[in-house]
Amino acid sequence: MKPPRRSLWPLAFLLLAFLRPLAAADLFYLGQKIPDIDKPWASGDYQLLIDALAKIDTTQANALPRRNGEFTGPIYRRMVNEENFRPQLNIYAPLELRQNEAREVLFRLKELMRLYFDFRAAQQPYGAEALGLMTYSLRQQAVLFTLTVEFWTTLSQTEQSNPVRLQGLQETKAAAAMLTSSALDYLDLTRQFARQDLVLYGAELGKQLPELFVHLRSDVRQELLARLTKLAEQHPYAEVRTSLGETLPVLQAIQADVEQQLAQPQPVGKPAAKLDLSVPQ
């Protein structure tokens, strides 16, 4: 029988509530250094948090920051704060660096989700937090797509036809499709997640999907529409059905618009007029 792990919550409260103003550059949570929660986080900050929480999770039960925790809430809310996207969308910074940073942050968000999800449990101990990280990851994926499209427009036609470039674009689309599909899978886990958590998740998911949906492949968009239609009609919770039902027309309009644009004939470039260098008669 494993000895019970000691509760260090009083120490955590003291560190977060009282020591923070004295050392703004260094913040510790349960003895582990974590990033500054008063400024946007980059990939390195997320990695520092992951390292800290991974150590804490092995010694302290139910100690990961909570979405609405009185003392740990500010840590969690910084994890999913859209202000973190601001440096990635700063047009004055090099585009390729911003694109790489978005990719790195997305990878670390997946690592964070591994800490918060526990599929061995009958019910998720961090249901609200895990689902919140999923919707935030969808937003990060959409930001990565925005930067990818921006980068793509800077390439010459020859570069856009480069097999390596095309493969990279397809891999980004495939990863986004997998993430979106997984996001819908969680809506079916009514035994593992509390009702209020899935209701909130359904509402947040409905807000995030349109921005990412437009970037997906046509076949993936059609598949997602079919799944969402079924969920909007058959999900056990009326609130989730309502949220998805309100999202469906938006996605259907996006699908129709994209398909209409793809169906239009591409303009044929007019050959440039030859420069007449002959001697005037």
Image (tube, helix red, strand yellow):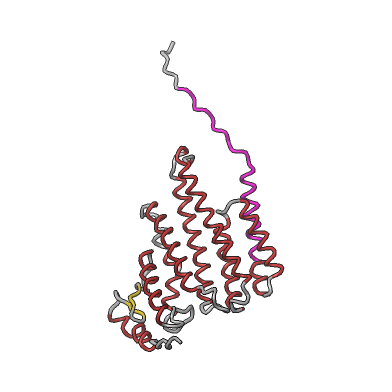
Q: Please, which residue is most extreme toward the top here?
A: 281
Examine the structure image and report whether residue 259 is included in the region drawn in magenta: yes
Relative to 137, residue 29 above or below: below
Q: Position of residue 52 (x, y in %)?
A: 37, 74
| Residue positioned most to the right | 233
Residue 151 spot, x, y in % from top left: 44, 49
Quarter-of-image position of residue 108:
bottom left
Across and down, in percent, residue 143 comes to: 47, 59
Question: How many circles with numbers are drawn on the protein?
Answer: 0
Residue at coordinates 44% horizontally, 75% vertically from top-left? 76
| Position of residue 31 measured from the top left corner of the image (x, y, whole percent) | 33, 80
Quadrant containing the C terminus in the rendered view: top left
User: Overall secondary structure of the magenta stretch?
Assistant: helix
Q: Nearer the viewer, residue 119 or 209?
A: 119
10 left or right, relative to 251: left
Reply yes or no: does residue 272 show up in magenta. Answer: yes
Q: Is residue 9 left or right of residue 139?
A: left
Magenta residues (range):
246-274
Q: Of 133 and 256, which appears nearest the observer?
A: 133
Position above or below: 30 against 244? below
Asked where in the image residue 280 lies, by quadrant, the reply is top left
Q: Is residue 11 left or right of residue 243?
A: left
- Give the camera-side residue of 73 and 258: 73
Residue pictured at 57% horizontal, 64% vertical: 182
- Residue under the image location 50 percent in, 63 percent down: 139
